[in-house]
Image (spheres, helix red, strand yellow):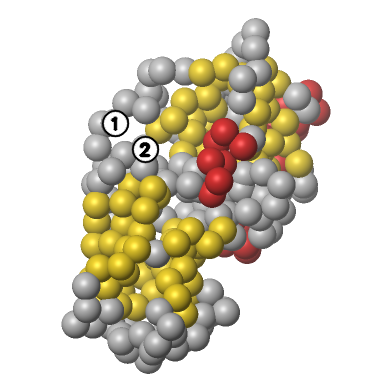
Amino acid sequence: MVSSSFVTFVALATSCLLILHSRSVSGWSDGGATWYGPRDGAGSDGGACGYQGDVEQPPFSAMITAGGSSIFNGGKGCGACYQCPGGPCEAEAAHFDLSGKAFGAMALPGQAENLRTVGNLRMQYNRVPCKWGGLDIAFKVDAGSNPSYLAVLIEDEAGDGDLSGVELQESGGSWAPMQESWGATWEYNSGSTLHAPISIRLISGSGNKLVATNVIPSGWQAGKTYRSIVNFQLLLIRY
């Protein structure tokens, strides 16, 4: 009844979320899985990573899960990807509370409803590189941003999927660290008017660096999403 699926971490208000894609990688760990929300839905919008309604749209496509504090890692685990092939385990060192759609995706063809009826599984999971079908990294400017304060929700990072640090560079300025606001949102409070265009440098969970040059343009607006033309390379990383 159980097949292999791939899930990405997106965190809810009291836990975290992940997203599923298939890939075969070694290094499995024991865990458990349940599901919540609509039977074939995205669980719920919002959450501690801040992706909100985006979890229902590509590339997430409702293939998400909630997880525990060790996976959430204070928000730095947002965006990480895991493979959940199912199968019996003797322990539950980690727990994934998947969306109904993601839980059903672990089933063999035609058996999704039967698997959801089981409700609680012992399974194995594995950290895998995130693959977003060629999408580049997106920066959604928080609605509370203003000329001297910028907060951005960062989405669609390939490879590690998670971030350990983010830096900002105003036009003509030097690099300055952004602070993790909550979930996958990072903020910078200048105290004076920010000079756009603004470049953002990302540091992945494994320390790789990438610059989205001038990704926040002159005349930027709160609430708008600006997609870069860069993303991390997919490397054969053993997590």
- To which residue does mark 2 refer? 129
The correct choice, above or below, for 11 with respect to 210 in the image is: above
**Quadrant (top left, top right, bottom left, bottom right) of the N terminus:** top right
Lateral position of residue 174 relative to residue 123, left or right: left
Q: Nearer the viewer, residue 106 or 68?
A: 68
Residue 129 in sight here: yes
- The kind of residue on which mark 2 rests is Pro
Quadrant location of the C terminus in the rendered image = top left
The residue that appears at 52% across and 32% down in the rendered structure is 5
SS assignment at label 2: loop
Which residue position is annotated with label 1? 237
Q: Find the residue positioned furthest to the top.
A: 90
Is residue 58 shown left or right of residue 14? left
Element at badge 1?
A: loop
In the image, what residue type sits under mark 1?
A: Ile
Give the residue at the far left of this rendering. 172
Whether tag 2 and tag 1 are in contact, CB under 8 A, the answer is yes
- Sequence-wise first label, 2 or 1: 2
Q: Is residue 18 above or below residue 61?
A: above
Vertical arrangement, residue 4 with respect to residue 28, above or below = below
Circle 1 Cα neighbour tier, 10 Å, few/some/many (<14 / 14–19 / ≥20): few
| Residue 199, placed above or below residue 29 | below
| Disc 2 from disc 1: Cα separation | 7 Å
Q: Position of residue 162 (x, y in %)?
A: 42, 46
Q: Residues within 10 Å of mark 2 (few under 14, many from 20)?
A: many
The residue at the point 48 percent across, 59 percent down is 180
Estimate the x, y position of residue 132 in percent, counting from the top left. Answer: 39, 50
